[in-house]
Structures are given as C-alpha cells and as structure tokens.
Image: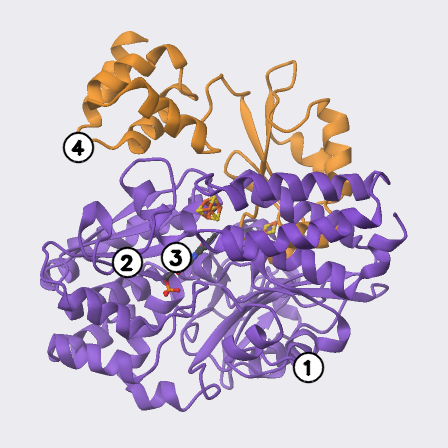
Chain colours: A purple, B orange
Amino acid sequence: MIAPAAKPQTVYVADDSTAIAAGANRVAAELSRLPNVRVVRTSSRGAFFLEPMVEVDTPQGRAAYLNVQPREVPGLFRKKPVPLARIPFLAKQTRYTFARFGENEPLDLAGYGFRAWQKAREMSPQQILAEIKRANLRGRGGAAFPAGIKWQTTADTPTEPKYIVANADEGDPGTYADRMILEGEPYRLLEGMMIAARAVGARQGYIYIRSEYPAAIQKMRAAIAQAREFGVLSESQFDVDVVVGAGAYICGEETALLESIEGKRGMVRYKPPFPAVEGLWGKPTVINNVITLATVPDIILRGADWHLSLGTETSKGTMPLQLAGQIRQPGLVEVPFGLTLEEVIYDFGGGLPRGCRFKAVQVGGPLGALFPARLLNTRICFDALAKAGGILGHGGIVVYDDQTDMVQLAHHFMEFTANESCGKCTPCRIGSTRASELLQAVLDGDAVPEDIALLRELGDTMKNGSLCGLGAMAPAPVLTALEYFPNDFGRRL
Amino acid sequence: MVTTLDAVLTRCRSSPPNILATLQQVQAAFGFVPLEHVPRIAAHLGVTDADVRGVISFYHDLRTSPPGRHIIRYCLGDSCRAKHTERALTALTRRLRCDFGETTTDGRFTLTKVYCLGHCALSPTMMIGEETYAQLTPRSVITALQNHP
Ligand SMILES: Cc1cc2nc3c(=O)[nH]c(=O)nc-3n(C[C@H](O)[C@H](O)[C@H](O)COP(=O)(O)O)c2cc1C
Ligand code: SF4
Ligand code: FES
C-alpha cells in the first residue's frame, strides 16, 4: 500500500555511479511511483556512507533521509529528515569546487551559468595568466607544479596550434574526485578548459578519461554535446573531445598520456622538452589534472586573493580529499590545506569501523608513503607531507586496519608497479620485478636478512635512477612499510 | 566478418593514423582484436604489424581472444585491499573456477583485474558489464552473478 506524501514534493536523489552502486537508482524508481512526488537527479555530495540519500527542501534548507532502502520509500515521508546542517561530515567542510554537489543537475547547462567564463571573456589572456599565477594554483594531479607557470610557457611558445589536455585518468586507487566532477559538474571542467584555452591561445582540447569510468565518459560527452549545441564552445572559439583510455596506469603520467592520445604505446617521454613547449603531436600543450582545471573558475570569479586566503604558506586553496579503506565515514572532504591527518581521519572520517584498529594510512595513492599512528599529526599540504617522506598526490587517503599484513601489502604495491611499468628504463622495469620477487620470498619464508638490505638498495636505485615518478616513487610504500612496521617483516626471516 | 572489419576501418580514418583508437573500435565490434586482422589493420593505417601488435600488448583492456558473455572487472586497488577484498575474491574464483585473465568453461564470465573503479568509498567493488557492485562480501559476490545469466 502506497502512502501518499502529504503535499506535492520535490525530492533529490544523486545520479552518481557510487551512489547508484549503493542503490540510488532503485530508490529513485520507487520514489517516482509515489503520487505527487517529483524526483530530481543531482550530483552527489560525496557523503557516500549515507547514500542513497533522499533530500527534500525545508524552510531551513535541505534535509535528507539517509541510507534509504527501496522498501522504506512508501513510508518515507512519515519520518523526519535530518537537516544537512546537522551532519558534521558535510557541515564542517569548506566547499568551493564541490559547492554545488548534491544540488545541481549535472547536465543543466543554464543552471551552471558559465559566469567565470563570462568574466574571463572580458579579460585579456595576459590578465588571466597573471591571476592564475598570483593565485599560486598548484597542480592537483600529483606533481604540485604551479599551473600559471605552465600556462605562461605555452602562451609564450610561438608554435601553432596549441592544445589543452585535461588529465582525467585518475589512476591512483583510492581516489575519485575527478570522477565526481566528470559525472557531477562536467561544465565546471569545460569552463576551466575554456579559460585555459583563452589564456594560452588554444583552439582544441582533449579530456583523457580512463575506461574504468563509463558513466563519466557518457556524462562528459553529453555535456560537450550540450555546450556545442548552445554555442558555449563556439563562442569561446574552442572545441573539446573525449579520448578514452585503455587500462594502463602509466597513461596518467603526462607524456605517456600524450603518446596514448596519439594512439601509441603509453611510453614515457624524456623531458625536456616539456609538454608546455612540445606536447601533443609536438605542439605546445597545457596538461592539467581535472581538479586543477575545476578550481580555475572560482579563481577567476572570486579573484586570486580569495585563493591566497585559504590554506598554508605554500599550499593555497582547498583540496578535495578522498577518504577510503577501513574508515567509518568514507567520502569526499573538501577543506583548506593544512589540517592534520588525524583531524581528517577522525573528525571527518569518524575513525575506523567498530572492532577495527588503526595500523597505517597511505596518502597519495600507490606511490605514497605508509604512515603509522604516531605520524598522524602530519599536516595535509604538499610540503609537510614531502618533509615526512610522502606525497599528497591526488589527495587519496586510505586507512588500513591491524589485520593488514604489511609484507603482503608491500608485495601488492611492487607487483602493481611491475604490472604497470612502461618498460622504458631499467631501474623500474627490472627493479620492480626483482623487488616483488624478493617480497614474495619474504612471504614464502624463504628470505634472509640480507634480502631486506638488498630490497632497500634496490629501492634506492629505483628512486634515483628512474625516468619518471612511477619507478622513482614506487619504493616509498615498501620502504616506509619496512621502516614503520619492521615486525611484519622480521617475524618471517 | 571481413566486410565488417572494412566497415570498422572506414570509420577509423584520421591523420595522423591512430592505432589505439582503431583497435578500440575493432574490439567494440568483435569483442576482441582478432590477431589475423593485424596485417589489414596495419595496412589500413599505414603502419607496421609490429606497431599494431605493440599497442595491443601494451594496454590491459585490449584482448586477442574472445571474452565470455560478461566481463567481470574485479578491483584489487588499495582501498579494496584495505577492506580485505581477498575474502570476496576467494569466494568468487572458487565459484567461477577460474583465475584472472580466464574465461569460465561455460563461456559466461571472463574475470579481469583492475586497479580501482573510483568507488573506493564503498570498497570492495567490482563491475559486471556496466553494472557496479559495492561493499562486496563472500555472499553478495555470488548473488551478483545471478543478475547476469
Ligand atoms: C606514474 C604517474 C601517474 C600519474 N597519474 C596521474 C593521473 O592519473 N592523473 C593526473 O592528473 N596526474 C597524474 N600524474 C601526474 C601527471 O604526470 C601530471 O603531473 C599532471 O597531469 C599535471 O597536471 P597538474 O599540474 O594539474 O597536476 C601521474 C604521474 C605519474 C608519474
Ligand atoms: S620509471 Fe617506469 S614507468 Fe617511468 S619511464 Fe621508467 S620504466 Fe617507464
Ligand atoms: S580501490 Fe577499489 S574502487 Fe578504488
């Protein structure tokens, strides 16, 4: 028996693939069978531990029913929804890039508005460059390089044509912020690319999306089609195409990515020349991460001073952190740089699920360091993490519990590198295979203490002798596992 | 089959030629890249057989043998590891009686591994076709198979 809602009611359900995996489509289908209910599909707020969420408007703002099951739908409106302001995970965030998430309809072009573009259109390319440089926008894809300097280099290179490439390969396991932008507010990425194109004088852009993201590919293509149809792209004298990856982690590295767009094996190129000077088909190319480009509209709209007012001395602005692994409240947390790992994991993430005990946290994907509990006071910004021997990378934070065997984990990371190495340089190609064999020997109980010394030495060689970050950073999780969790290794020798 | 390859190849004209994009189209049409087609693909693109084979062997997505009816992409990424995905995986491989890179004897499933599907907030995860399954348990991983006869 279906109980009608008290009065005609609009409800909001996320159209995000993680929310859908949690059951959002089934809940939306049940809701649309109720009389007097209009279901609007929005982006997700990224509080995935609460999905499927069903939101409603109240005089005090949005409120939500949490973790809704399809069978609860008929009686849902007899219950009281929770005001979002009373969900600390959301209320305590500082959202700019993800400000509209949970409210906007992903493909609603008029609703998006392109206001930053309208402002940028009135600025000269040099004014845009100056603003991005002054804002000290550092790349969010991993290398933290200042975007403004990259853009200026491309602008100053006389070769034509020039290209803008959005790196949406999002290869680091444990990260999903790019995916959320592509699925939830694709116009934001387009707008960032349009502004970059105006700044450097590019007419064509590419968005390289990994094949593991079918929903994102589809949404991004639909957004581009809309933007073309309504003349947004032609007005900016810029066009964009989506290129789909083929399952190779190394194709997130910028030069391998360019090779892949050109249709070749994703082999890393020697640098220099840098892509900003000789990139796609040898032409000057700006390549930026999705989040970097998605931050650009706010910098243009609010000004560089706004960006400079947030964060730490050398890491300005906000960072969308992505909580994953063994954590009670996994999801997207956009906060200014500078919070400690502990604050993010416990105040936002709620710590570990009941019955689980903390063992380690890995920041920055499979090439990032593993930190033990005593380093949880490390601040989340590019420099503090580097000083602690790690990286921020793309902002992935994966928590491991004490059931995790660090030797098995270290072996997993090395096997990953051996699998994903492009094979161009010896330290990475051979080193990762040898290191994973050594770790297998430790697992099998066949290793002697000298093997651990050999492992460290191999790590050093890879760190110092590899051409790109994959080989150079792959030893980090293994060496930090050895340093902070020696017992896991020692008891097997 | 021959005419179909021609149909696919005529859609893949670009200058300079794009090997990966062409192979992705071929795989979309046939489900895999039949190795006997390599010479004709190479000739069409004006590249060598070795160029084409090099690209095929580089990318994990490209296959040279026909897959099962449904492709399972099982996540072995960091977050899913942290959630002890090996427990559900063991149940799955036991049921399927096949390992990564293999197809079940009845041709129903091909099991492949991926490193992250972007659903890490609800680890462990896998995809069957375009359907995503999250928060996998040894039990739910088996139930999921039933949706894909
Ligand atoms: C092995 C490896 C993998 C990478 N994967 C990615 C990725 O998936 N996404 C990304 O944006 N950057 C990735 N990067 C960083 C890129 O090379 C490049 O620095 C980045 O796209 C530049 O954009 P940004 O300055 O806006 O961060 C990777 C780097 C390395 C060495
Ligand atoms: S470090 Fe590894 S991935 Fe990078 S260029 Fe060398 S072989 Fe290729
Ligand atoms: S690590 Fe498995 S979905 Fe991301």
* Residue B76 visible in the shown view: no
Please tell me whether mark 1 or mark 3 is closer to you in this view. Answer: 1
Q: Which residue is mark 4?
A: B14
- Find residue A480 and report its image quarter: bottom right
**In the image as oriented, which residue stretches furthest toward the right?**
A491
Please tell me whether mark 2 or mark 3 is closer to you in this view. Answer: 2
- Disc 2 secondary structure class: loop
The x, y position of residue B61, in whole percent, is 46, 32
Q: Which residue is mark 2?
A: A274
Residue depicted at x 63% and y 53%: A459
Alpha-carbon neighbours of circle 4 within 10 Å: few (<14), some, or many (≥20)? few
Q: Is residue A317 left or right of residue A121?
A: right
Image disc number at residue A437: none
Q: Which residue is mark 3?
A: A182
Tell me the amino acid under the disc marked 1: Asn
- Disc 3 secondary structure class: helix
- Label 2 to label 1: alpha-carbon separation: 36 Å
Viewer-nearest residue: B90 or A266: A266
Q: Is residue A236 left or right of residue A296?
A: left
Image disc number at residue A377: 1
Q: Is residue A466 left or right of residue B88?
A: left
Viewer-nearest residue: A272 or A277: A272
